[in-house]
Image (cartoon, rainbow, N blue to C red):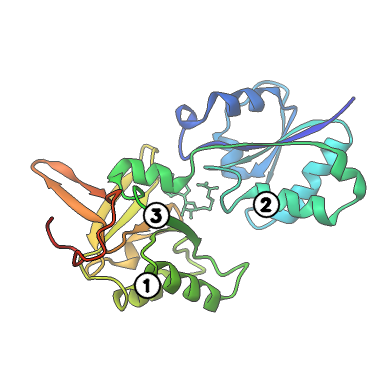
Amino acid sequence: MSGKLVVIGLGPGPAEHMTPEAARALAEADELFGYGPYIDRAPLRDGQIRHPTDNREEAARAAAALERAEAGAKVAMVTGGDPGVFAMAAAVVEQIEAGPASWRTLDVEVIPGVTAMLAVAARSGAPLGHDFCAINLSDNLKPWPVVEARVDAAAGAGFVMAFYNPRSKARPWQLGAVLERLRAILPPTTPVIFGRAACRPDEKITVFTLAEADAEVADMATCVIVGSAETRIVERPGLPPLVYSPRFFLPDLPAGRAR
Ligand code: SAH
């Protein structure tokens, strides 16, 4: 019996946001690994074995899934959004690189999903219509000065930035510190989107200017998108505003001015 490990992205919300390819791979798996709440979100069929784990046990979880695949099981590792964005696909490949040579011969497949920043962007207009980057604000796996240097460089170079893991009980001050740095680099009118639980029933998308943005609005279910100097807010009567970054770049146009 030959085993397999499929790393599956469930997308940002309920099953309708999952790709048909992900749904098919999930149905074919005999054993599911992943952070408990993600496994709870995965539609299950009878007979599938579930191995829910805590969010912080990523290396051990990846190794356990590889061991089961080597033993011949059809294993799925489930993650929210896309598995390659601040998630389990890299944890699995880290284990393959460091682990026994036999793991390099395993059948491993990564199935993409809609990542949080794309869901939040879609819900708010087109803020990622020009060049952008994604930065994980968690300093669990990298030193905080590295986060600061990347934020400064990205904002200074005119990238729209999507911040993942912006704020948690254990990391309450980081997003506020980042917004404070950005106020020294970007115009006060720069749009800031707090996209909470995008595509889920409790979705909440709020748009502020950088001057108004309050880090306390964010939690672990929020992806924060900070615009560039070109990003604009289009107000609409009786409807939520549309935030967008124009596809063109006019270097001589003062930030925030009407065209
Ligand atoms: N692999 C996931 C990201 C994992 S990191 C993906 O591709 O989306 C976890 C962070 O993702 C959260 O702290 C939050 O910043 C963001 N996130 C995940 N789902 C979200 C959603 N539905 N709406 C807004 N942000 C979300």
Query: Residue at 32% across / 41% down in the picture?
Result: 123
Of residues 182 and 197, the one drawn nearer to the viewer in this rendering = 182
The image shows residue 144, relative to residue 41, as above or below, that is: below
Is mark 3 in CB contact (under 8 Å) with mark 1? no
CA distance separating discs 3 and 1: 24 Å
Closer to the camera: disc 2 or disc 3? 3
Question: Callout 3, which amino acid?
Answer: Asp
Image-quadrant location for residue 122: top left
The residue lying toward the viewer, choosing from 17 and 226, is 226
| Crowdedness near tag 3: few (<14), some (14–19) or many (≥20) residues, C-alpha within 10 Å | some
Q: Residue, x 35% and y 51% (percent of image)?
A: 130
Nearest to viewer (mark 3 / mark 1): 3
Mark 1–mark 2 Cα distance, whole angstroms, equals 28 Å
Q: CA distance from mark 2 to mark 3?
A: 24 Å
What secondary structure is found at the residue carrying circle 3?
Answer: loop
Is 126 or 94 nearer to us in this picture?
A: 126
Mark 1 and mark 2 residues within 8 Å of each other at the beta carbon? no
Q: Quadrant of residue 32?
A: top right
Q: Quadrant of the C terminus?
A: bottom left
- Which residue in the protein does label 1 denote? 176
Residue furthest out toward the left: 237
> Which sits earlier in the primary sequence, circle 1 or circle 2?
2
